[in-house]
Image (cartoon, rainbow, N blue to C red):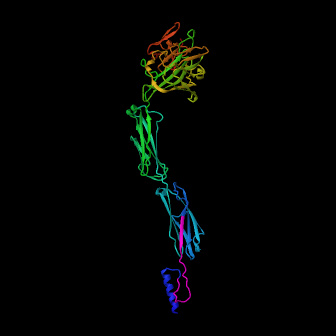
Amino acid sequence: MKKLAYVLIVVSLVIALGQSKSFVQPSNAASATVDVLGLPALAVAKTDDLNPAKYDHVGQLVTYTLTATNTGHVTLHNVTVSDSPALDGFSCTPSVPVASLAPGASIVCTGTHSITQADLDAGSFKNTASATSTEANAPDATDTVCANQNAKLGLTKTDDLNPAKYDHVGQLVTYTLTATNTGNITLHNVTVSDNPPLDGFSCTPAIPVASLAPGASIVCTGTHSITQADLDAGSFKNTASATSTEANAPDATVTVYAKLYKLYFPIILSGVNNNWDVTVGYEDLPFSSSNLDFDYNDFLVAIHSVLTYDQEIKSNLQKVDFILTPEARGAVYDHEFHMFFAANIFASDGVATLTLFDQNHNVISTQSIPFVAGSNNNFMVFSHTSDIFPELSNTYETKPRLKPQRTAELSIEFNTPFFFNLAAYPLTDEHGSGMFFDPYLKVLGSGEQIFRGDSRMLVIMDINWMWPEENVRMDKAYPLTTYLPGPPPDVIFPNGWWFKHNTCVYGDGIPCPAP
């Protein structure tokens, strides 16, 4: 009886202290052996399918696997597994709670987490797994995945002028600045500025913006009023900047340019007529013809010419443009109309572009032709004046004015700008002998060719000039002129002759009275 009591006391003591699973009774104890059962134990492990890689965008899925195992020697009951924050699609095999889990057995659970903007901004996402049972709880298992953060701010700037150019003081140029979060984390304290400061500068949303999500933008607008200094400088440069706490954008610079040193042909003015356009009229009959009436309306064309000079060296010619608009055809004959440039009139080769338009200014054809400075350059602009006006047009006051069926533009751009002295080509002769180009007319049928200097070509420094009506000789419509019967016949044109006319001109609305 004393031995049994001794054994019970020792067993109770060992169990209380939790220091041994079994013991051997002393040599003087009874021969019976008592085993102490093992303590309950539960463990949980957690893995992910991302590490050691990093997440970099919203919506990226990370899949987790949680394994809870009975690591003790006794069956565990009511075993459950959970995760915080809760995973999406969380499921376990076997399903939790598990009524009983034998020693060595496991529960395997899976779930996913979809990366959020908050996860990207935080730089990492930590997730904790837990496992519990009636007998024992497992130590928590924590898993951390990290972000590949990219803080980036982009900036663009546009204006409403380019590729056009400014040409007067007070001209408004409107700018649009767009700052965009092109990275993958939220930017904070975002601001946009411009130098020199723009007038009326404002942004949507208002700056500074406390937080700007990836893909979001700030749009700002402002204006600059062109100054005389901008015109003198030839250009105006404006630089936009955008900053945030996390990243700054590369500056965005926009430059607009002045329309510099553009002069209209002719450069030499005569009389009181200060415009830059000319009208050219032709008589297409031979000097020997008894029907040569000098009404200069057999074909008429208005020529608007622009000489563009280099922005850096303003005396160097860079480009010349001609806009050719037929006005009338009062002849039975058909014609070719040419633009001729003699060799060495220009000091640089280049490219000539001839564009033909219909009556609605739709392009009919465009051709690019090498311009060779050392050779004669002859461009046939209109192959048939009858295509422009199929019938006699715009010479009888009693008939309605017809629109030309063809117009043209001729542009010559030089490879190398060069000094060009317009003063060497004065328009002192009404027959165009001083011009640097020759707008000559070839008469189809008769073979006559009417070049500059020919008295059958008349050049008037007025694009709105009213020519004589059909079969009305020049001196009968413009009384300041004098007709010389010749031979050969000719007309004398005093200075300012075109300012005085009677009702025998086309365009005044009054038919010429019968002689």
**Does any portion of residue 178 appear in the rendered image?**
yes
345 or 511, nearer to the observer: 345
Question: Which stretch did the figure color magenta?
Answer: 23-46
In the image, what residue occupies the spot 44% across and 35% down?
Answer: 256
**Does any portion of residue 331 appear in the rendered image?**
no
Image position of 135 with respect to 239: above or below: below
Question: Which residue of the protein is positioned furthest toward the bottom in this rendering?
Answer: 1
Question: Which residue of the protein is positioned furthest toward the left in this rendering?
Answer: 229
In the image, what residue occupies the spot 42% across and 41% down?
Answer: 239
Image position of 194 with respect to 275: above or below: below
> How many circles with numbers are drawn on the protein?
0
Most frequent secondary structure within the magenta stretch: loop
Q: Residue 45 in the image: state x and y as whole percent.
A: 54, 67
Q: Residue 16 in the image: state x and y as whole percent.
A: 48, 82
508 magenta-colored: no
Question: Which residue of the protein is positioned furthest toward the front in this rendering?
Answer: 27
Q: Residue 179 in the image: state x and y as whole percent.
A: 46, 46
493 or 117, nearer to the observer: 117
Q: Residue 25 in the image: state x and y as whole percent.
A: 52, 86
In the image, what residue occupies the spot 55% across and 10% down?
Answer: 287
42 magenta-colored: yes
Image position of 60 with respect to 491: above or below: below
Image position of 412 with respect to 482: above or below: below
Question: Which residue of the protein is positioned furthest toward the top in this rendering?
Answer: 487
